[in-house]
Image: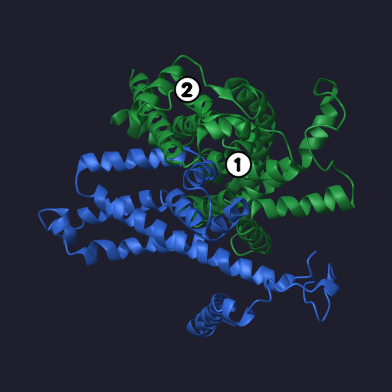
Amino acid sequence: MNSQPRLVAAGYAGVFGLLVLLLLSSSLWLGDSPLHMQFEARLMPPSAEHWLGTDALGRELWARTLAGLALSFGVGLSAALLGTLVALSLASLAMLSPILDALVSLLIDTLLSVPHLILLLLIAFALRGGTQAVIIAVALTHWPKPCPLAQSRATQLAKRPLCGDFERVWQTPRIYCLAPLAAPCAASLLGRRTAAVSPRHFA
Amino acid sequence: MRLTVWLASRLLRLLLVLLSVAAVSFGLMMLSPIDPVDAYLGPQMAQVSPEQRTLIAERWGFNAPASVQFQHWLQQLLSGELGWSHIYNQPVSDVINQRFQRSFFLLLSAWLLSLILCVVLGIAAGSKEGSLLDRLISGYAYITASTPTFWLAMLALLLFSVTLGWTPTCCAGPTGVLSQEVTLLTQLHHLLLPTLTLALLGVATITLHTRAKMAAFMRSDTALHAFAQGASRFDIAWRHGLRHASLPAITLAFASLGELFGGSLLVEQVFAYPGLGQATVAAGLRSDVPLLLAIALFTALFVSIGNLIADGLYPRADPRIARDRTNE
């Protein structure tokens, strides 16, 4: 059945890429249809003309769903990227000295002990809503999870002969220490899709 | 002796974490562009003169620098004074007390239910990797892992409360009845759907981790030896595997208390259940700063104690950890 695993994987990746591309370009080919009101066709059930029906103002529900999805996807993606950046930089900072390491772990413990939705609420409260605030809030609340992973990975790496040959960690060629860190980061990046979508509910 | 030292160091750490939670949340409140005097006055804002506003601000100490305000708040906190919630017109400690009592049962039953479900499903799936049961359970876990809580809660509400009419649509008791007169059975009836929604969604991660651990154990030499002696698969899973698989389950179950609380925020909002989660959302939307700060601290305490319990339970599940800890 799976005689060509690479071909199958490439196929899945292609379909996924196509969907993402379609989603990201949706604002181009949707035009103003998410906002276009048709008062003669209010609250219509799904039909061939109105694929998912229409709302109380006669706007196409499928277009509105797609536009919302594209926004959520953008928020999720940028928040995940930003959060990963924060996690990576703090993990590398923690490698420099024991005091910094203790400080970073205290920060992580602090952020992990507050339920992330409450922290999200606090940050959104401080920044007063809006798409940008949601991106920052999601990024700042979700970085602590991969950070301990990256941190323990970094400590393991520092003990390796390859990195240990250098006097101090920061003299190590970055590529050796950072490339293997990419794995936990990428995993957490993909895992955050739903996490990023549900807080949109509040914004 | 060693246990006391370990416990003391953990408690010190807990205190440090709580202090930084207080500092971070207070700092965020300070950053917020919301004027606390406006939030307090609400719709009466228009009837108050600028002189009166400055009087209020002076009386509450808003003119003092942030560090002085923080110190003041911390002192009040230490003496047990959490402040006054202007949206419920009650002391914050009373609000949290009442709300948490209602939420506690919801959280506890959802947590226990999902823990039992997770361990059973994880062990059933892991003990025979690749079987039909394994694929069904893993599939279910992957689907729930990617389902947003509030969406499932809405679907459940539509199906069971609106279409089938089996469960009530909202609140902790029927409308028009005093809360003292609501019977236990009615309360349970109102809790049923929120609990089930919360429990079914919390299942995914713990199930998958338990399953992975169990599957790894089934491939180990210990399991092979037991198979050679003629033990059945169920025997091996039950007598040997359970202890191995319980370790990630314990860790995750206590670590997920925060997630559970976050889930209850959404579920309580959808089911209009008057618990702590709903109070949190209300405090955030209507700028009730003392209540929001107190809830952040309270939940941090709740989650930290959960982690402390998990740490205490490890040596019971795995004697190797107890040995390492005494050797330190």
Q: Position of residue B119 (x, y in %)?
A: 61, 45
- Residue bearing the label numbered 2: B60
Q: Secondary structure at mark 1?
A: helix
The color scheme shown is by chain
- In the displayed structure image, the side of residue B216 where residue B138 appears, left or right: right
Q: Residues within 10 Å of mark 1 (few under 14, many from 20)?
A: few
Chain A visual colour = blue
- In the displayed structure image, the side of residue B194 where residue A186 appears, left or right: left
Q: Chain of mark 2?
A: B
**Quadrant including the N terminus of chain A:** bottom right
3D distance between C-alphas at marks 1 and 2: 22 Å
Depth check: B36 or B107 in front? B36
Q: Give the amino acid type for the residue marked by disc 2 in the picture.
A: Trp
Could you tell me if residue B290 is visible in this image? yes
Depth check: B139 or B96 in front? B96
The chain in green: B
Q: Chain of mark 1?
A: B
Q: Residues within 10 Å of mark 2 (few under 14, many from 20)?
A: few
Q: Position of residue A100 (x, y in %)?
A: 24, 42
Depth check: A31 or B196 in front? A31
Residue extending farthest top: B79
Q: Give the amino acid type for the residue marked by disc 1 in the picture.
A: Leu
Numbered disc in front, either 1 or 2: 2
Is B260 drawn above or below residue B70 in the view shown?
below
- Residue bearing the label numbered 1: B285
Q: Secondary structure at mark 2?
A: helix
- Residue drawn at the location 45% of the way across and 18% of the way down: B76
Q: Position of residue A83 (x, y in %)?
A: 41, 56
